[in-house]
Image (tube, rainbow, N blue to C red):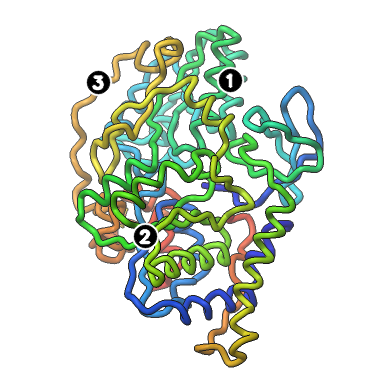
Amino acid sequence: MCLAIPAKIVNIEDGMGTVDMAGVQKKVSLILLEDAQVGDYVIVHAGFGIHKIDEEVAMESLRILREAAHLLDVEDPAGPDEVTVTGFGTEEGDS
Amino acid sequence: MKYVDEYRDPELAEGVVSAIREKSRTPVRFMEVCGTHTVAIFRSGLKELLPETVTLISGPGCPVCVTAPEDIDRVIMLCRQPEVTVATFGDLMRVPGSDSSLHQEKARGADVRMVYASFDALELARKHKDRMIVMLGIGFETTIPTIAAALHQARQEGLENFLVFSAHKLLPPALDALLSAEEVHIDGFLCPGHVTTIIGTNPYQKVVNRYGKPCAISGFEPVDILQSLYILISQIEEARCEVEIQYTRAVRPEGNPRAREMMDEVFEHAEGLWRGLGPIPQSGLMLREKYRAHAAESHYDLTVPPAGEMPGCRCGEVLRGVCTPPECDLFRKRCTPTDPYGPCMVSSEGTCAAYFKYHPE
Ligand code: SF4
């Protein structure tokens, strides 16, 4: 099962990090990462950090997404079809 | 939660759904090949939001489900050795082999420990020098570097009692096998985010170049998946075919070279045996010569007879995307999450389990 929630590194000691993942602290090996630092957000799999999130990249992709999603509303206020999406993915502890 | 809540935003999802409806003309069938995607798709109910032109099918994405019954039988053989402690991730416990499961063996006294990470199994090996600790290597490219790192460490420390049973699977050869079999029509793939975090986009080129099927590397939140579908639909409507990363916050085109070096240091390619797909060349991994002393099969004879199919269970077809769970006669009757019969119901990210949980009768 992939953990979709990025974890924040709060401490590093001998290549092992402590991360905070939605309020839960876990030990994580940082051996597969080049340059992890305290304060970085990382993707964790099976107890190992496998990717360090680049804040700028993350913000940029969100901007592109928001633009793509809202562009339609701007150009065509009614939208092609009325769709209503109600909150999903909120089940705790399941992702 | 940072980097998560934004991708669960219903308003944003609505925008992407509108964009999909606007764009989609051609009827298409996309396959997701990651158990976490399967669960996310069912849980969010996003299939209901898609136009009729878009069909989603589940493929061989659940690592526990694709583990061949013969490999489960080998694991059972291992845990029956008096000096062996089996260390495993939790999901494998209840998966049935030919005549038993790890869970049953544990109840009968076998030493089976659930671990959170490979380094916990290393710790067991350090503490219990009189035991052979066998870490089960089940999983795709996301898990493999973590097992490789433990083997690397074990060799450095001279921990001779740390062994690995490698039933790892590589995902891209499975996509190749599915497409070349031509059993099920697929127009594009929703590719697993964290597998690609490691391998990068290059291994999908064959799917794009040889088979002309677009690939979108997707994150796991509902908006991620919708955006990835939008990417696939756009490519098809615009007659393009590429590997495109939706999940840029966690995936670089080049992947994670350091993790791949670790994999490469320890493992070499071998034939992989898949439930449902059978043997696929170059889709499995074995320990390199240098590490062979840490391979479970170097210490134990793990020859097993071919395992028969489980009567009535259509998990193999479910894994190939040929059959949906309700088409199995045992679904909801003999086979439920509380009393599972086949592996696709045992694992929480199996297609049958996800279908059961999020489709009330
Ligand atoms: S419902 Fe159960 S028996 Fe049927 S295919 Fe799924 S796992 Fe197998």
**Disc nearer the start of the sequence (1/2):** 1
List the residue tagged with mark 3.
Answer: B303
Q: Which residue is depicted at the point 72% across and 28% down? A: A16
Residue B72 visible in the displayed image = no
User: Toward which corner of the image does residue B50 lie, by quadrant?
Assistant: bottom left
| Residue B361, horizontal then vertical, whole percent | 38, 73
Give the residue drawn at x 41%, y 70%: B238
Q: Earlier in the sequence, mark 2 or mark 3?
A: 2
Quadrant in the picture for residue B271: top left
Q: Is residue B221 left or right of residue B64?
A: right
**Earlier-in-chain disc, 1 versus 3:** 1
Label 2 packing within 10 angstroms: few (<14), some (14-19), many (20+): many
**Disc 2 chain ID:** B
In this rendered view, identify the residue nearer to me: B33 or B102.
Answer: B33
Left or right of residue B151: residue B105: left
Q: Which mark is residue B122?
A: 1
In this rendering, the answer to whether B350 lies above or below B115 is below
User: Residue B188 bears which disc, if any?
Assistant: 2
Label 1 and label 2: CA atoms lie apart by 40 Å
Task: Judge the density around disc 1: few (<14), some (14-19), many (≥20) Cα neighbours within 10 Å.
Answer: many
Task: State how far apart marks 2 and 3 are (Cα).
Answer: 38 Å
Task: Identify residue type, mark 1.
Answer: Leu
Query: Where does the C terminus of chain A fall, quadrant-wise?
Result: bottom right
Q: Which residue sits at x=73%, y=52%? A: A22
- Measure the C-alpha gap from mark 1 to mark 3: 26 Å
Secondary structure found at label 1 = helix
Residue at the spot 52% in from the left edge and 68% down from the top edge = B226
Q: Nearer the viewer, mark 2 or mark 3?
A: 2
Residue type highlighted by circle 2: Gly
